[in-house]
Image (cartoon, grey):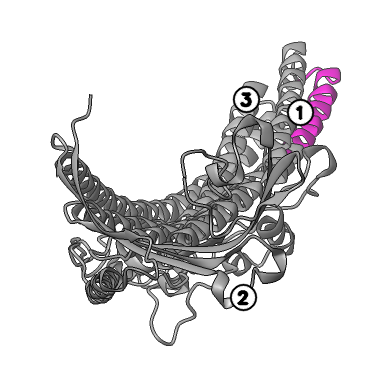
Amino acid sequence: MKHSVKRRLNITRLALSRDSTPVRGIAAAAIVCLTTLALILNGCSVGPKYRKPTVQVDPAYKELKPDQFKEVDGWKTASPKDDVLRGAWWEMFNDSELNTIEDRVNTSNQNIALAEATYRLARAVVREGRSQYFPTVTTNPSASVSQFPTNSGRGANSVAAGTGQPGNSQPSSTGSTASTGRSNTITNFSLPFNVAWEPDLWGRVRHTVASSAYQAQAAAADIENVRLLMHAELAVDYFQLRGLDSQTQLLESTVEAYRKALELTNVLFHTGIVSEQDVVQAETQLETARAQLIDLGIQRAQFEHAIAVLAGTPASSFSVARGPLQSNPPAIPFGVPSELLERRPDIAGTERRVAAANEQIGVARAAYFPSLSITGGAGFQSNMIGTLLTWPSRFWSLGAALSQTLFDGGLRKAISEQARAAYDETVATYRQTVLTAFQNVEDNLATLRILSQERDQQEIAVRASERNLALATERYRAGIDSYLNVINAQTTLYTNQRTALTIRTEQMVASVQLIMAVGGGWNVSQLPKP
C-alpha cells in the first residue's frame, strides 16, 4: 500500500461572475503572478551537465611498426594526402560482382530496414516529448433539449439548465422554458474552449526530450552499425565463396592429374613394370578426390544462400557465377587510435546512450520539486442557437494548482538511484565497447601480418612440393619407386596448394574485418542533430 500525501494549493478554480469583481481581481492577479513565475522558472534545470566519459587511447597501434607502413603488407596509416575509407568501401577490392551484390544491401536487407524503423520510432518519441512544452487546447460543443411532464411536479425551475439535475431553486440564465400545456422543455447550446498547461519549472520535460533525442541519435548510429555489419558479413561470405571456387578449380586440376596418373599406371601395369596394387591405389586416389570435389558444392551452396539473404533476395532465385579469388588484399587506410572513437558507429551509439542516461538523472531530480498546472476555459452558452455567438453569451474561467509530494516512502530517492546506476552502467558499456574496438583492430592487424608471413612461407612449400612430385613421378616411371611415393607426393602438393588458397581467403576475410573494425567509411559527424 502506497502512502502519499499531497498538498494542493488550489489558488483558483473560480467561476468569476460579474457580481464578484474584488474576488475576481485578486484571483486574476494571483494567477498572473504564478504564470509569470512559471515562465521565469521555465528556464531552470536541476540535472547534471553532461561530460563525455574519458577513455584511455594509445598514440599508435601496437601491431604497427615503422617498417610496416607499406601498402604491400595489406594496410597503411591514413594521412591528409591519402584516400580515406569511403562509404562504399567494398569497391576497393575491384570486384564488379561483389559491388553489384553489395548495392542491394542498402535497399533490400531486412535488418537495415528494422534498424531504420527503430530510428523513426525514436524520432517520433522525441516529437511526442516536445509536445509537452505547449498547452493542450480542447473543445466539446454540445446541444441538449430536456422535456419534463407538468403533472409530475417537476418544472423547468426545479431543474438546473443543461444538466437535468434537481435542487436549483433559481431558473438558469441559459435555459428556456417552453410550455406546451403538457410539459416543459429546456434547451441549451454550448461552445466551450478549454486550455491546460503544465510549465516545465524544473526541466523535467527538457531533460526528457534531450534524453529521447540522444536515444534517437543512438538509433541512427545503430543503423550505420547494422549497415556496416551487413556489408561486411556479405563481403566475408563472398570471399569465402570465392575461396571455395578456387579450391574447386584446384581440385578439378588435381582430379585431372590423378586421372592421367591412373592412365600411366595402367600402361605400366600392362607392360609388367608395376603391380595391380598400384592401379588400385591410383583408382582409390582418383575417386577420393572426386568425392571431395562434390563435397565442396555443399559449402558453396550454403555461402551462396547466406549471400542471398543478406542481399534481401530469396535463396531460390539467387546465384553467383563461379569465379576465382583475387590474389592480394587491398591497402587499407585506418588512421590512428584516437580517430577510432569517431569512426565506429557502435562507439558513437553507445556514447549517445550515456548522454541519454545522464538526462534521465535530471528527470529523476525534477520529481523533488513542486509542479504547477494552469487551466482555463472560455466560450459561449445560450438557450437559443441564434444568440450563441453573442457577447452576453460569453463565459470564462481561469485557475492554477500547485502540487508537491510530501511523503512517498522513498520512491523518488529510489528512482534517482536507479537513474544514477543506469548512467554508470552505460558508461561502463561505453568504455568496454571502446576497449573491444581497439582489440578488434589489433587482432586483425596481427592476423594480416601473420598471414602475410605464412603466405610467403607456404608458397615456398608449394614450390618444394611441386619439385618433389616431379622427382617421384620420374622415379616411378623408371621403376625405381612404387606408386605409393607418387601418391604421397601428390597428396602433399595438393595439401600445400589448398593451404595456400585458404591463407589467401583468410587474408581477404581479415581485410574486410579490419575495415569493419575501423568503422568502414563512417564518421560521427554524419549523426543527425539532436
Of helix, strand and loop, which one carries label 2?
loop
Tell me if I can see residue 239 in this picture. Answer: yes
Which is nearer the eye, 140 or 147? 147
Q: CA distance from mark 1 to mark 3?
A: 32 Å
Residue drawn at (67%, 23%) of the image? 483
Magenta segment includes 257:
yes
Which is nearer the eye, 204 or 68? 204
Q: Nearer the viewer, mark 2 or mark 1?
A: 2
- Over which residues does the magenta segment extend? 254-273
On screen, residue 332 versus residue 304, left or right, reads left
**In the figure, 305 relative to 52: above or below?**
above
Given the image, on which type of amino acid does mark 2 rest?
Thr
Given the image, on which type of amino acid does mark 3 rest?
Asp
Residues tagged 2 and 1 counted as in contact (Cβ below 8 A):
no
What x and y, as percent, mark residue 140? 60, 56
Mark 2 surroundings within 10 Å by alpha-carbon count, few (fewer than 14), some (14 through 19), many (20 or more): few
Mark 1 surroundings within 10 Å by alpha-carbon count, few (fewer than 14), some (14 through 19), many (20 or more): few
Residue drawn at (36%, 72%) of the image? 335
Residue holding disc 2: 390
Name the mark on residue 481: 3
Name the N-terminal-most of marks 1 and 3: 1
Q: Nearer the viewer, mark 1 or mark 3?
A: 1
What x and y, as percent, mark residue 204? 28, 59
Given the image, on which type of amino acid does mark 1 rest?
Ile
Name the mark on residue 294: 1
Which is nearer the eye, 462 or 191? 191
Magenta segment includes 30:
no
Q: CA distance from mark 2 to mark 1?
A: 92 Å
